Image (cartoon, helix red, strand yellow):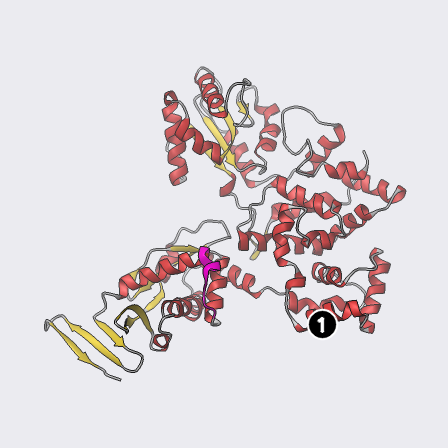
Amino acid sequence: MQFSQLLDTLARSSAQAVTTLGQGQKEQDELKSYLYVETEIEKDFRRLLDSNLTSDTVIFLCGSSGDGKSEILKRYHETYSKRVRFHLDATHAFKPDQDAIEALDQLFDEHSESDKPLVVGINVGMLFNFASQGHLRHENIRSAIESYLQSGEETSNSYKFLNFEQYPKFSIEEGKTGSSFISELIARVVATTENNPLHLAYLDAVRTSPSKLTLNYELLKHEQVRDRIVHLLLSARLKFDQFLSARALLDFVHHLVCGPCLLFNNLFVAGHNDLSDIISHFDPCTIRSRSIDQFLIQHPLGIREATFDDFQNSVQETFGIADIESAGWLRFFYLFQDVAIGNDFHKNFKNDFEQPLYDRYIEIWRLHKTYNGTSEERQKLRAFYKGELVSALVRFGNRLDPSLTAKQHLFLCSRNGVFVSAVADIKPDLKRIESEEMANNIHEFPVCLKVGDEPLKTFNVNLSFLELVSKINDGYRPNKHDKNTIVILEEIVDDVIKAIIRSKKLMLSDGRKHVYLTNEIEDSEIVVGGVE
């Protein structure tokens, strides 16, 4: 099969994108088998199949469309089908006039008369639908599903749930943040081995008809380039909570190699692939710095440094790439920033490409995840809470009277032009951070605060929240464009106000002077004093 045809197998639009129990063409089936990467959820699924399952057991392998449920079920169907019944897709009906809910009712009816355990591949949305619309005769199944969806816990030994959402694509591995699954999947696509059908087809294409496809494939062979792409996918996950399924990732790789441009442009140009549409937000051409702006302006005018001309010649000799526009060069610099090429002119931009916010987020996430109370960890967490989070909370809470921030007060309300405030003794609840059960999902971490000794409820926050915190501390005033993130900020401030409003000492100010009111409970009187 030709190189381009085999690459098309990776596309979402390919007939092979969805796995069934039938057989495809030999080369395509061999490629899918070769590209398959075993995941932790598959290992747990296999252990569950090998356990002592009773005939009334139902295993729900659940997740979202394209995450690999059918592929896992197909791989184990042949080995286990004699003692376990497999239903690959809960959206499939048994008859033309039957909807998915009716098909599940029929499936569970047949299972009740069977002597085999049942395995069902099902989307989370369909779980919700069956829990609310399934027939009453399956109330026990509906109840088990509903309990799992609400609490994440299994309430019956007869109903087992394995959810792809509980197995995040990104994790901290050996102190570094990455994704072994995504890295291995992309590495398999370009692996130089006779077991890789794509590599064999590529060699044949290079000999007979070299093209943009073979060039893009060569560029993807660089491990540093693949690592940079995985880093961008992590950024997309953190910034936009982007869902990454196996099918979407393969379609993304197909676009990188087979898209309309060279790989580094395919990566950032929107309008051709869902993931590239998201990654286009991280286009290095949108970064504003002196050196980047200078390059983008001078290059089209023909104003070039001699070192760049030498570098350009090295790129042409190494990759056969020439005649790139300024935006394309900048994207090339970004993608190959860790690859040594000629005089390494492209590495002059490396500092401009750094993403300190993302690095800071991962650092804070890791501190919350691994916190065990050492003095160094306490110091780092206190620095984050006091110097960044609490500072932003107080600045935001005092946006109507910024002068209160310097006095460590928080605005409570205003009456007839008089602002009422109280001391905001906000600090991290370190004991709660240590005991907090933190999920493995890297896109959020828990904020644990207390006012004085009174704990506030825990809030899960993400990268967008941390970005807003940083911007507020730099003087930014949130607006309607921040509405999704500002809701969390307002909830935290409201919780703080509910705690400090019971303070014994309030301050009243009209912009010119301040008066303190102290509630002397033992003497049953309010003392007025502290005029400034």
Work out whether residue 50 or residue 369 is closer to the camera in this orientation and state it: 369
Q: Is residue 467 magenta?
A: no
Q: How many marks?
A: 1
Q: Position of residue 169 (x, y in %)?
A: 56, 46
Compared to 529, does 243 lie above or below? above
Q: Position of residue 353 (x, y in %)?
A: 65, 65
Q: Is residue 479 magenta?
A: yes
Q: Position of residue 143 (x, y in %)?
A: 37, 30
Q: Is residue 129 visible?
A: yes
Quadrant in which the N terminus appears: top right
* Residue 422 occupies quadrant: bottom left
Highlighted magenta segment, given as a residue range: 476-484
Work out whether residue 185 or residue 515 is closer to the camera in this orientation and state it: 515
Compared to 373, does 517 lie above or below? below
Work out whether residue 260 or residue 21 is closer to the camera in this orientation and state it: 260
Q: Position of residue 109 (x, y in %)?
A: 44, 18
Quadrant in which the C terminus appears: bottom left
Q: Residue at x 37, y 62 (%)?
A: 430
Q: Residue at x 10, y 71 (%)?
A: 524
- The residue wearing badge 1 is 294
Mark 1: amino acid: Gln
